[in-house]
Image: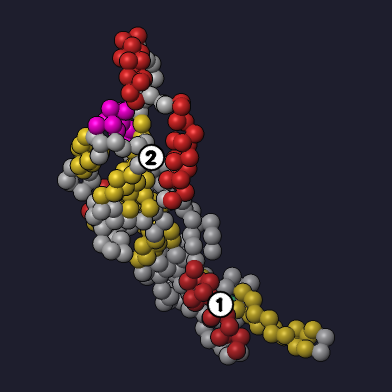
Amino acid sequence: MFGHDQPGGSPFGPGGFQGVNISIDDLFGGGIESIFSQIFSGGGTRRRSRGTDLLVNHEIPFQTVFDGSDESIEIDVLKECEDCEGTGSPTSEGVKECPTCDGRGRIQRIEKAGFFTKQVVSDCSTCRGDGRIVSDPCGACNGEGRSKKTKQVTFTVPAGISSGTRLRMRGHGEAPRGAGGESGDLYIQIEVNQHPWFERDGADLLMALPVGFVELALGTQVIIPHPDGEDLRIKIPAGSNPGDTINLPGRGLPGGRRGRGSVTVLLKLDMPKKVSRSLRKSLDSLKDEIGTDFDKLEDSIRDEAQRRRRS
Ligand SMILES: [Zn+2]
Ligand SMILES: [Zn+2]
């Protein structure tokens, strides 16, 4: 079930293709159900084989979450062998039904356990669960009925997609063993690359904006480029404090519950690392006006706590 070979020449870059197979359908679709139905119908049904599901990781730039895009990838996948049409042999006599299990691929035996008799179903050891024996194997696939092929897969990434989303492509997984089964599915797991400054919360975006004391005190307008194509105009009101937030509704990512999300800008105070002699002199002269009033310190501590607890 697991441990599928990692396809060579990965277009996903190092670590991009994990080469992990998941077989949700094997477990919860065909697998368990068909085992149960075999037990309850006395093992009479012929086992229908299904190819393994594949999982590939696919990175997309942050911009794609705004725009959506049509993507194309190449995968190496086990497909039905064209030389033998998946049977495993060039001749019809080269493939025989397994005599041990009559082509079922499974063996049933009755075991006694105390007062009870138990029906045990296991894979046939003669044909390794295949239900058939290849005496004249096809040269192209060594009797497997399948061979590795490079395949181009195109798919659409919808706008608003988040990291970890798996797009399912029915029938694009591995071909089944032997002719007549159905191919597995291909799952494409999307990884969204980080934006240089935005953090994401669903359709909402959060960023920090470092500005100086003067900009916080007097207010200003900051204009920065935005992935939606229209510049982001951030109005900082006069008398702003570090930690204040400015909300820009409708400028976040598409796909939110109420349309596009919002951009939240967190104001940060960017203090100079080094204070020059002349700056020190200027700041000193402002101390009386805008410095901390130590006579009223307790009052301002109390006020601040009150504001904080209210919000
Ligand atoms: Zn058999
Ligand atoms: Zn073949």
Which element type, helix, strand or loop, lies under badge 2? loop
Question: In whole angstroms, how far apart are the C-alphas of marks 1 and 2?
Answer: 55 Å
In the rendered image, is residue 36 in sight?
A: yes
Q: Quadrant of residue 234?
A: top left
The picture places residue 122, in percent across and down from the top left corner, at: 64, 76
Give the residue number, with chain letter if any, for mark 1: 32
Give the residue number, with chain letter if any, for mark 2: 243
Mark 2, residues whose alpha carbon is within 10 Å: few (<14), some, or many (≥20)? few
Span highlighted in magenta in the image: 209-218
Which one is in front, 134 or 160?
A: 160
Q: Quadrant of residue 258?
A: bottom left
Q: Is residue 250 above or below residue 175?
A: above
Image quarter for ligand 1 equals bottom right
**Amino acid at dot 2:** Gly
Of badges 1 and 2, nearer the viewer stands 2
The picture places residue 17, in percent across and down from the top left corner, at: 42, 50
